[in-house]
Image: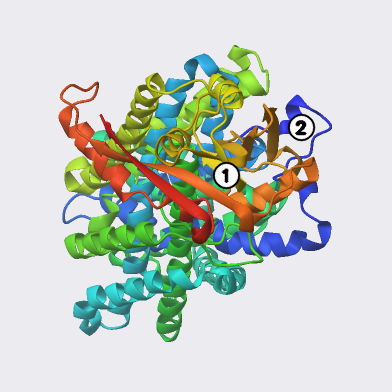
Amino acid sequence: MIHTAIANPGAVPSGSDDAHPKAGFWALTLGSIGVVYGDIGTSPLYAFRESVLAASRPGQPASDVAIFGILSLIIWALLIVVTAKYVIVLLRADNNGEGGTLALMALAQRAIRRAAPVIIMLGIISGALFYGDAIITPALSVLSAVEGLKVVTPGFDEFIVPLTVVILLALFAVQSRGTAKVAALFGPITLIWFAAIAAGGIWHVIGNPRVLLAFSPHYAVEFLLSHGVIGFYTLGAVFLVVTGSEALYADLGHFGRGPIRLAWLSVVLPALFANYLGQGALVLANPKAVENPFFLLFPHWALVPMVLLATVATVIASQAVITGAYSLTRQAIQLGLLPRLEVRHTSEATFGQIYMPRVNVLLLIGVLLLVALFRSSGALASAYGIAVTGTMVVTGLMAFIVVWKVWRWRAIAAAALIVPFLFIDLTFLAANLLKVVEGGWLPLALGTAVMVVMYTWRRGTRLLVNKTRKQEIPLESLVASLEKKPPQRITGTAVFFTSDPEFAPTALMHSLKHYKVLHEKNVILTIETAQTPRVDEAERVRIEPIGKSFSRVVLRFGFMETPNVPKALAVARKLGWTFDIMSTSFFLSRRALRLAAHSDMPRWQDKLFISLARSANDATDYFQIPTGRAVEIGTQVTI
C-alpha cells in the first residue's frame, strides 16, 4: 500500500516510523517478533525436512549436491522473497499506514478506477486464498510441533493426533476472551524460540562450517539444472520457508515499518539462517536424521523442553493467522464482499482486538478436518503453499499498479522492479501446482468456494440496488411534496437508513404509507466505506440540509473500522446538529428476498445470495444502534 507521503511529502501515514513514538519503538519491535514472525519462524519445523525428502529418490539418501542446493535455495528465497520484496519494497507501499492484500486492493482501485472490476476480482482471489492459509497454518504448525514427541520416544506416536486436537480446541475456545493479555507474551516467548533455534543450528554449523558455502547461489542453480523435474518439484517444498511473508505486510499498521524491519534483519533472519544451515550440517553428517532434522539438532535432555517451546510457538503462529482471518473478514464486509457478520470487540484499550464467532467456528471445523484427513505434518505440507503463492502473485500484480500509478514511476521502471519478483512467485506457484493431487486441491477448493461467495454477494447486492432504485422516488422531489402538503407531525427525530442518499429510503416511504405521520426532524442517513483503513474524526460526518425538516447525513468509516452510528452522530453535534438519542428513532428496511421468475444470475447463485442475505447479522447490532430505538420495516423483493 503506497505511502501517502510519496504523493504528499508533508504527510505522515500511521505505518511510517514517525507515527510510532520512539519510546515505544523497542516494545513494537519485540511485539512484531511474536505476532508478525510466528508463522515464518516455525517453518524450520518442517520446511527443510520436506525439501530434502522431495529431492530424495526412494530408498536413497539425498546427495551432498542436493543438500547444498536446497540450503542455497532456502537462503536466497529468504533474501529475495522476504527481505527484498516484502521488507524493502512492499513495506513502503502502504494505504495510510496499513498493509495487507485488501488495503493494497483499495489503493490500486483508487489509482485506476477504469480497471476497478479487475482489481476487485484480484482482491477477491487473494482474500479467498488467505482463508486456505488460515486453516492450514494451525493444523500444520501444531502437528509438526507435537510430532517432536516421537523423537523423545516412538511410544508417543498414537497420541500425536489426539493431543493436537486438544491443543487446537483449547486455542479456538479462548478466542472469545480476547488475545490482548496473551499477546503481551508473544514477543518474549517467540524471542526465546528464535534464540533456541539459532543456538541449536550454530552448534552443528561449527561442526561443519562447509555448509556456509551454501550462500553462493551457484549451488541452487547447479541443483535445479542437475535434478530436472525433481528439482522443480522440490521448489514447492522450499517455498515453505517463506510462508508467513504476507503477515509482515498485513501487520504494517500495528507495528510500523521500522520495528518490523529491525526485527527481521537483527533477529529473525539470522536465526533462520543458523537453524537451516544447522539442519543441513546434521543431515550431511547423518542422512538418517532427515526423519526429523529439527528436533535432532538438540541433545536428548533438551528434547522435551523444545517440544513444549515449539508447541507454544506454533500456537502463537496460529493465533496470528486466526486474528488475521478476523481482520480480513471485517475488511471484506466493509468493502461489500461479504454479508454483515457479528463482530465483538474484546479490548477497550487496544484497537483491532476483535472476535467473530461465526468465522471462529468455521475455521475450527476446517482445521480439525485437516488434522483428521492428513494426520501428519508431512502429508499436510503437500497442501500448503498453493494458497500462499497465489496470494503473493496477486500482491505482486497490484503492487505494480501502485508503483506505476501511485508512486508515479514510469511503467518500464515499475516493471523492472516488480516483474523479477513476479517471475519468482509464478515459478513457486507452478512448482506448488505439481502437488495438487497430493493435497494441494484442498486450499484451491476452499479458495474457490470463498471466491464464489464473495463474487455472488457483490454481484447480488448490485443487482438488488439497481432493482430497488427503479422503484424509488428522488429524495428532493419527495421533500418538496411533503413541505407543500405536510402530513401530521409528531415530536422527535427520525433517522432513515439508505444506501443511496439521492433517493427516498424504503423505510420512509412505508412509514408515510402506513403511519401517515412525519417526525419534526428527519435524517436520511447513509453509511459510506472509505478506501482508506480509517477515517479522521474531522471527516467522519457530512451534513446537508434538505428543506426545513429534512437533512442528509453521510457517515464515513474506514474499511478497517467497525461502524458505530451513535458515536459517529455524536460528532455531528460539533457541526451544529442537536442530537438526543432518547428522542430519536432509527428506521431500517428489512428486505425479505424471494426468487424471481427471471433473473440476471443463475438459479443456484440466486439461492446462494438469498441464503447469505438471511444469514447476515442484524443491522442494529452491526451499526451498534440501541435496540430500544430501532424500528425495522419489512418489504419483499424478488431477485
Judged from the image, the secondary structure of the residue bearing numbered disc 1 is: strand
Quadrant hosting residue 452: top left
Task: Give the mark nearest the N terminus, 1 or 2.
Answer: 2
Alpha-carbon neighbours of circle 1 within 10 Å: few (<14), some, or many (≥20)? many
| Residue for point 55% across, 34% down | 104
Residue 585 image point, x, y percent:
55, 50
Residue 172, quarter of the rendered image: bottom left
Residues 489 and 187: in front is 489
Amino acid at pointer 2:
Ala
Q: Position of residue 97 (x, y in %)?
A: 67, 42
Q: Where is residue 520 shown, x and y percent of the image?
A: 63, 41
x and y percent of residue 525 in the render?
A: 57, 38
Residue with the most extreme bottom position: 301
Crowding near the residue tagged with mark 2, few <14, some 14–19, many ≥20 C-alpha atoms within 10 Å: some
Instruction: Kindly identify the residue that appears in the image at 39 percent across and 52 percent down.
Output: 617
Rendered image coloring scheme: rainbow
Q: Which residue is mark 2?
A: 5
Q: Quadrant of residue 314?
A: bottom left
- Asked if 48 appears above or below 161 in the picture, the reply is above
Q: CA distance from mark 1 to mark 2?
A: 42 Å
Identified by mark 1, the residue type is: Ala
The residue singled out by tag 1 in the image is: 494
Q: Nearer the viewer, mark 1 or mark 2?
A: 1
Count of numbered circles on the image: 2
Vertical relation: 46 (above or below) 179:
above
Residue drawn at x 57%, y 44% is 494
Q: Determine whether the residue tagged by mark 2 lies in a helix, strand or loop.
A: helix
Please name whichever residue, 483 or 112, is drawn nearer the observer in this view of the structure: 483
